[in-house]
Amino acid sequence: MIKKFGTEAQEFRDTTLGGYPVTLKIDRQRYRCDTCRKTFYQPIGCLDNRRRMTSRMVNHIVTQCLQTTNVHVARDLGIDEGTVRAVFREWYEEQNRTIRFATPRVLGIDEIHLTQRMPRCVLTNVGEKRLFDILPNRKKDDLRPYFEMMPDRHRVEVFVADMWKAHHDIAREFMPRAGRVVDRFHIQRMANDGLDVIRKSVARKRTREERIQLKDVRFLLWRNAASLNEEEADQVSAWLQHSPELKRAYRIKEAFSAAFDEPTRREAERAFDRCLQSIPVDMDPAFHPLLTAFGNWREEILNYFSLGGVTNGYTESMNSLIRLLMRNGRGYSFEIMRARLLFNKEARSRGTSVWPAPIGWSSLNVSA
């Protein structure tokens, strides 16, 4: 039998009112069980069961943590920063236990350098253009347990990455049926880099004023000729006319870029081969990284034409958004950065597939 066992005055922190702290004072009823002799308090739905504050206060702390730093939240609410961290961590762990995004059909993967520590690993749903997850690092030994636990990984049909071998090894091991694509922009960048080596070689033979002018025009040289306006095309043409060496390198870069516009894989393969075979012997050192990469990743590069022309452009844009977030937050912790990108309303808006996490599912260890 349960009997009343007196009352106890308790104080609970609530959200601020007009910028001033609010404390609720409650005479809370106590009860005791005659069988086990244990006491407990009257349950009140609007109170948090883990600390002396209202559920509204807890939700407010979480909402503010997703928008600003813990220090600012603690100062504005007049509470200890450690309390803010504890509240947010509990909410964060609850999201990890209960929410997961549907495994994408087209999975993009890339790394991002935010600090001097190990680069973070970014996973995206390229088809839906949504962030899928962020992992503490990109080491193969740490990625393997994550992908081993990934539910429905058989749903991945296309795996898009750069030429980081560990990522492709993971795809071969855990998604053997998925087609692997090397992002076209990474391989195109190597053609641009080869052109830039030649540009610098040409600049060293010019006057100081000409070197400055040629440096200024480098961005126009990297762009496709078709995307230049009339004035920009004239600037490029002027330099190509004065430097046969630069003109040859520019044509190689343009031919390599044009190969990605071929309608079929077979025609593209022929176009790539013609372009690479046209590189003069004296330019081999400049374009050596491109030649090596195409030789090592030929199948994955050509899969671009077989698998719908997918790229990692969205993943790269997400990396830019993450860098902006970290810069504005002056160095958020990994948990807050990940929560702001994954669990906010935008990440879970209509059009994003969100499924209940199965029992035992935990997306990653966030202790890093």
Image (spheres, helix red, strand yellow):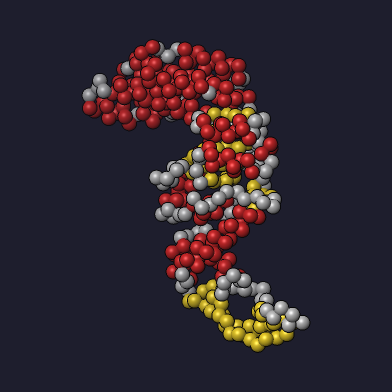
- Asked whether the viewer can see residue 271, the reply is yes
Q: Nearer the viewer, residue 55 or 20?
A: 55
The quarter of the displayed image where residue 126 is located: top right
Figure quadrant of the N terminus = bottom right
Q: What x and y, as percent, mark residue 173?
A: 61, 32
Residue projecting furthest to the right:
1
Q: Is residue 144 above or below residue 101?
A: above
Residue at 51 percent across and 14 percent down: it is 273
- Asked whether the viewer can see residue 124, the reply is no
Count of labels in the image: 0
Q: What x and y, as percent, mark residue 82?
A: 47, 66
Residue projecting furthest to the front:
36
Residue projecting furthest to the bottom:
6
The quarter of the displayed image where residue 301 is located: top right
Q: Nearer the viewer, residue 251 or 307?
A: 307
Q: What x and y, as percent, mark residue 291?
A: 46, 19
Residue at 57 percent across and 22 percent down: it is 299
The quarter of the displayed image where residue 278 is located: top left
Q: Is residue 296 above or below residue 51?
A: above
Q: Is residue 99 above or below residue 8?
A: above
Residue at 69 percent across and 50 percent down: it is 358
Q: Nearer the viewer, residue 57 or 345?
A: 57
Q: Is residue 224 above or below residue 25?
A: above
Q: What x and y, as percent, mark residue 222?
A: 41, 27
